[in-house]
Amino acid sequence: MNKSILMGRLTKDTDLRYTSGNNTAVASFTLAVNRRFAKEGQPQADFINVVAWGKTAEFVGKYFTKGLQVVVVGRIQTRTWDDNEGKKHYVTEVVAEETYFADSKRTAPIANKPDSSEPTVSESGDGFYPPMEDDDLPFNGGLDFP
Amino acid sequence: MNKSILMGRLTKDTDLRYTSGNNTAVASFTLAVNRRFAKEGQPQADFINVVAWGKTAEFVGKYFTKGLQVVVVGRIQTRTWDDNEGKKHYVTEVVAEETYFADSKRTAPIANKPDSSEPTVSESGDGFYPPMEDDDLPFNGGLDFP
Amino acid sequence: MNKSILMGRLTKDTDLRYTSGNNTAVASFTLAVNRRFAKEGQPQADFINVVAWGKTAEFVGKYFTKGLQVVVVGRIQTRTWDDNEGKKHYVTEVVAEETYFADSKRTAPIANKPDSSEPTVSESGDGFYPPMEDDDLPFNGGLDFP
Amino acid sequence: MNKSILMGRLTKDTDLRYTSGNNTAVASFTLAVNRRFAKEGQPQADFINVVAWGKTAEFVGKYFTKGLQVVVVGRIQTRTWDDNEGKKHYVTEVVAEETYFADSKRTAPIANKPDSSEPTVSESGDGFYPPMEDDDLPFNGGLDFP
DNA sequence: TTTT
DNA sequence: TTTT
């Protein structure tokens, strides 16, 4: 059993792509989740990477934009990928199963049924799933990652 | 293990009272939680009763008003009470452990520490905890509420 | 958003029935969920009614037996039904979306996909869904209920 | 709002340490959480790192052993730490707020109150909190553990 | 680096 | 007895 529920704001617009194989939609975004008991001099939020697939991906790719306050119900996933130098990278992220608007005006429940379109292989090479350019790394939040 | 997470709107202002014994704050409200896959001709929401104690009660008693969209993390509680005729009533409600604003402008995490001030005896007689008038039934059990 | 996660033991074997309309499987059972901070002289557990539909119902109807420790992920549902005297009854229960074995030996994740076979009308008359005998009331735990 | 509920097995015994500053207990372990819809040729589980503080840490340090099936309620935390070469590492883990035994015989709710003893500074240098040797990396970051 |  |  693996269930996570998060409410937070998008740090930037959702990144929507499509797998090369079966052309499945894959969306990714980062949620800034404010800490309940934040201490001064410490980070005020956790920055949690979220991935969505299929219909859910298309939905969030369309409506989940920078700064929007949303709720995500999903599961924690861990995976590894190997970079060009053959070094193994460990990734922990949340796979969205249900998504909701939290902000006013945008509160109707979103009818995105659980989607079973997750591809079977995590196409490796750069640690992310869909086809992409070299300079297009996942969740590197503006920083240059090796 | 007993954990519930709800996002919904208050159907009316929070009802805040104090126990007669130790004068602990007790707040109650009902959350209208819209259904994800509502069917036409069917109810569009579930109406879930929520109780809060101590600091949490004082907080929601102050800020949780009718129509506000909030998030509640808590546990499901079942209990019984006997009415004047000696008839047993079964109650299922959520005891709030953490509360959050979901609507914009009101989104900062709310620092209400888990409160251990729950009284040890559920003062019986009318099925509710705090001191109250005879015509003052929990969640307004069928009576007219002002 | 409406998510509940419970771990507890079945108070009796699951009750499995079928709707008269479309012959959908409906299972119901009660979970005794031990309280984390139980106080002496107070109830040690909450008794939470759970309903499951379709494939999930058939699964739990087969494997969820009295005393078994299980985990249920679902949503809180409220509904009303009218008894013979035309009196309205309020029901709060958990609709199971995912189920798991918690006890050893029975721990493999259970592949019961979310089921959309919930009937559109709650066939009333006795407060429960499927066809049933008169003496066959839901969740009355052995007591005679008026 | 940031809530995660996991049921899984310990991949090894809990690692219990104490911070140098205030001598707070810190426990860490990894949970193998089996996937609900595992695909063949794909990983069957997610391996999720969990950290606990104070009383909770002492509890799990004592009772959470390799192979035990447990439930953890907590929050997802992200943080960074710099290694000896000044390289930044990103960590995502679950901070345990409540813990339970899932396996039979070990099912009583565990009374470990939420603990507020989390230190204010994450003593850096090697990405982990408690006092430790140089070769003592968080979650055994690539080194051989006994 | 992974559990049953 | 229900919210937007």
Image (cartoon, coloured by chain):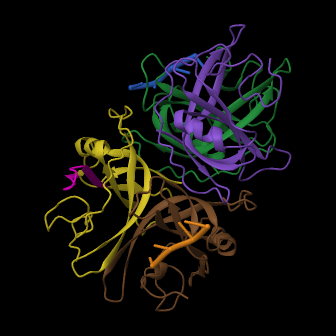
Chain colours: A yellow, B green, C purple, D brown, E orange, F blue
Closer to us: C75 or C134: C134
Q: Is residue A19 magenta?
A: yes
Picture layout, residue B145 above or below residue D66: above
Q: Nearer the viewer, residue B89 or C91?
A: C91
Image label count: 0
Residue at 16%, 61% (x, y): give it.
A132
B107 in relation to A76, above or below: above
Q: Is residue A59 left or right of residue B116?
A: left
Q: Position of residue D18 (x, y in %)?
A: 60, 81
Q: Is residue A142 magenta?
A: no
Q: Quadrant of residue A48?
A: bottom left
Image quadrant for the C terminus of chain A? bottom left
Depicted A118 relative to depicted D99: above or below: above
Residue range corresponding to the magenta coloring = A16-29
The answer to whether B137 is drawn above or below residue D89 in the figure is above
Image position, residue D105 (x, y; %): 76, 61
- Which picture quadrant has residue C48? top right
Name the residue: 37% across, 67% down.
A79
Residue B15 shows in this picture: no
